[in-house]
Each structure stands twice: as C-alpha cells, then as structure tokens.
C-alpha cells in the first residue's frame, strides 16, 4: 500500500496580492456607492447664497423674534395642521408665502402643502409615511415681517 504525502500549503506572493486587491476592492466599491447615494439623494442647500443671506440675518432675526409667534405642526386624520399663536395665545392669520414638506435626507418625498385657513389654524391634506419630516415655512405677518422656521414632525404610525 502506497500513500502519497500532501504538500503543505504555502502562502505565495500572488495569494497575498489577491487578498489585498479583494479587500481594497470591496472597500473602494462600498465608498463609491455610498458617495453616489449621498450626492444624489440629499439637496444640501438651505440658501442659494449664504453670503447674501448673512448680510441681514441679525436684523431679520430680531424682527422675527419681536413677533413672539409660537408655531407648531401636527397630523390630524390625514391633514397637516399648522398652528400659529401670538404671545397672548391667540391664533394668527398670516400670509403663507412658502411651505415645503419633506424628509431631511431625501428629496424624493418632498411636497408643497396647500394650506387653508380654518379660523384658528391652517390645514392641508398630505400623505406622510412614518419617520421624521421637516416643514420649511415662510409666512408674512400683517406688518410685513417675514417669519421663517423649520418645524420638525415625528410621524409614528
């Protein structure tokens, strides 16, 4: 009976090369995919020109804070309800100049609610899924002061 002895496995240069190329290939592929997703799903801009926006920031902030508005948003049976109260707790009927509703990380679900005044608040039918939503609001007070705020909504069900 003859037995053949097996050669022990020896690590050769091309094994090491394949290991390095495979490991770095996976890392580079994942990085490229993640960078592509980050660039193509997030708008990244709050204002078009930050320098121009900064020129009147302090004055705009003081004027907005002088309004002493308390702004909140909530969902109620498929309607987005936006409430604006003055410092006395009375409803404010402002002019809604812009309202953009969307997720913080993706523009695919963005929508523009069409608010209607109900006598004490604003209401707009919207279809929102679970998660965090941002309402970027621009409203103008009766005295002409522009009010801008980002309101975060947490939809649980």
Image: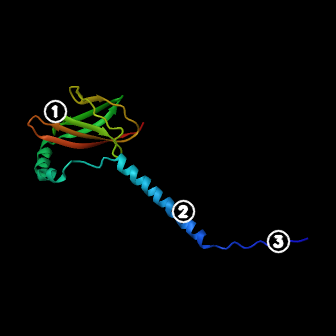
Few, some or many C-alpha atoms within 10 Å of disc 3 (few <14, some 14-19, many ≥20)? few
Estimate the spatial distance between the alpha carbons at disc 3 and disc 2, rounded to whole Å: 34 Å
Q: Is residue 126 above or below residue 1?
A: above
Q: Nearer the viewer's eye, disc 3 or disc 1?
A: 3
The circle drawn on residue 4 is: 3
The circle drawn on residue 34 is: none
Q: Which residue does the image show at 88% across and 71% down from the upper left?
A: 2
User: Is label 3 in contact with label 2 (beta carbons under 8 Å)?
Assistant: no
Few, some or many C-alpha atoms within 10 Å of disc 1 (few <14, some 14-19, many ≥20)? some
Q: Secondary structure at mark 1?
A: strand
Query: Sequence order check: which comes first, mark 3 or mark 1?
Result: 3
Query: Residue 49: x percent and y percent?
Result: 18, 50
Instruction: From the viewer's perspective, tell me whether residue 37 is left or right of residue 43.
Output: right
Query: Residue 156: x percent and y percent?
Result: 41, 39
Q: Secondary structure at mark 2?
A: helix
Q: Which residue does the image show at 50% across and 61% down from the upper left?
A: 25
Q: Nearer the viewer's eye, disc 1 or disc 2?
A: 2
The circle drawn on residue 22 is: 2
Corner quadrant of residue 141: top left
Q: Which residue is mark 1?
A: 95
In depth, the one of 119 and 135 nearer the eye is 135
Q: Is residue 77 above or below residue 36?
A: above
């Amino acid at each position: 009976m003859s037995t053949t002895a097996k050669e022990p496995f020896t690590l050769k240069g091309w094994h090491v090369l394949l290991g390095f190329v495979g490991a770095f290939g996976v890392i580079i592929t994942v990085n490229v995919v993640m960078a592509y997703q980050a660039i193509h799903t997030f708008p990244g801009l709050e204002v078009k020109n930050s320098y121009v926006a900064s020129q009147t920031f302090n004055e705009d902030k003081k004027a907005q804070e002088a309004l002493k508005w308390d702004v909140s948003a909530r969902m109620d049976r498929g309607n987005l309800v936006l409430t604006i109260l003055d410092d006395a707790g009375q409803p404010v009927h402002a002019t809604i100049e812009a309202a953009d509703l969307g997720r913080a990380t993706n523009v695919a679900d963005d929508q523009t609610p069409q608010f209607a005044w109900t006598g004490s608040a604003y209401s707009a039918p919207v279809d929102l899924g679970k998660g965090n939503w941002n309402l970027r609001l621009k409203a103008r007070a009766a005295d002409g002061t522009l009010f801008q705020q980002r309101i975060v909504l947490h939809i649980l069900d």
